[in-house]
Image (spheres, helix red, strand yellow):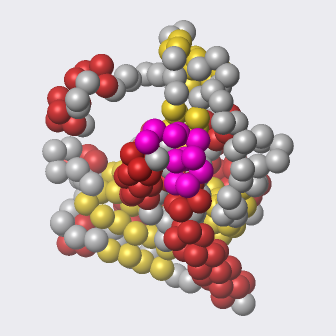
Amino acid sequence: MNRYVSLHPLGSQGIQWNHRIVHIDRMSHQVSFNNGHTVTGVDLIIGADGINGLVRSFKYDPLTDTPLNYLGILVVLGITGRIDHFLIKDRVFQTMDGCFRLFAMPFSKSKPEQSIMWQLSFPVNLTLATQLSRDPEMLKQMLLEKCADWHSPIPEMIEKTQLDLLMGIPAFDRDVVSLPDSKKDGIQIALVGDAAHPMSPFKGQGANQALLDAVDLADIIAQNNLDLHAAINQSMCGSIKIPASLSQRCSRSIKAVACRRST
């Protein structure tokens, strides 16, 4: 990231840290941030702030926007290390029992205590998933109990994961529908990645899709001679075609897995 900042055309002013949008006044071309900073004369905002991003709520009315769909799965992410086992020495491994699925991979070579990143997913109702996502201690205890008889080094990986490096995320997607944005005047808002078309973390491309969307958006803006409204509408329509098909396949696969687990 430091190298990226140093190569940015605007230098250190091109990236501003610790700025979280709290309000967008589209007609006044003004954006306000949580640190009290206000920017005026804004023509374009690109929301790359993920599935729960705030920018989308200023583009589409939250009351009429397509809702998020809970996929029935809780995804747990953890970072740990200082474990001596052949399965985690510069390699990736995956373990499943028909209900729980764990995936582990190398994470950091410079920090031995953070050398492993693991992801564990399992079906759970939304009420419990929400509770577990808000209580890392409860989440860790549940995983230790559920995975107590799993092969080494999985129980040790979970045990050695610090609570501040453990996170539970209920998995959602959103039906891919092209919604109109009739505001031709004022700040134009584009969405990329999960902010535009969130998919489950199993087959969705996450940040990679946001990068692809950004390249397409830049090309379309250049082709439209900076007609931002037309460019964004064209970009948003194009960027959801592939994710729409992928999202449908992913939703079907998750439902199939859930059905097998319930039989």
User: In the picture provided, is 178 more to the left or to the right than 202?
Assistant: right
Predominant secondary structure, magenta span? helix
Asked where in the image residue 229 lies, by quadrant, the reply is top right
Residue 45 on the magenta span: no
Residue 222 visible to the viewer: yes
Q: Nearer the viewer, residue 255 or 204?
A: 204
Which sits in the foreground, 179 or 90? 179
Q: Nearer the viewer, residue 202 or 38?
A: 38
Q: Residue at x 47, y 22 (%)?
A: 19
Q: Is residue 245 left or right of residue 91?
A: right
Residue 258 locus on image (x, y percent): 67, 80
Quarter of the image for residue 56 reads top right
Figure check: 17 above or below 213: above
Q: Nearer the viewer, residue 45 or 131?
A: 45
Range drawn in magenta: 225-235
**Residue that protrudes farthest toward the top in the picture:** 36
Residue 158 pos. (x, y %): 43, 57
Quadrant where the N terminus sits is top left
Q: Position of residue 249 (x, y in %)?
A: 59, 79
Q: Which residue appears at 65% of the width and 30% of the height?
A: 185
Is 233 displayed left or right of 82 in the figure?
right
Q: Residue at x 20, y 44 (%)?
A: 111
Any magenta on residue 229?
yes
How many marks the image carries: the answer is: 0
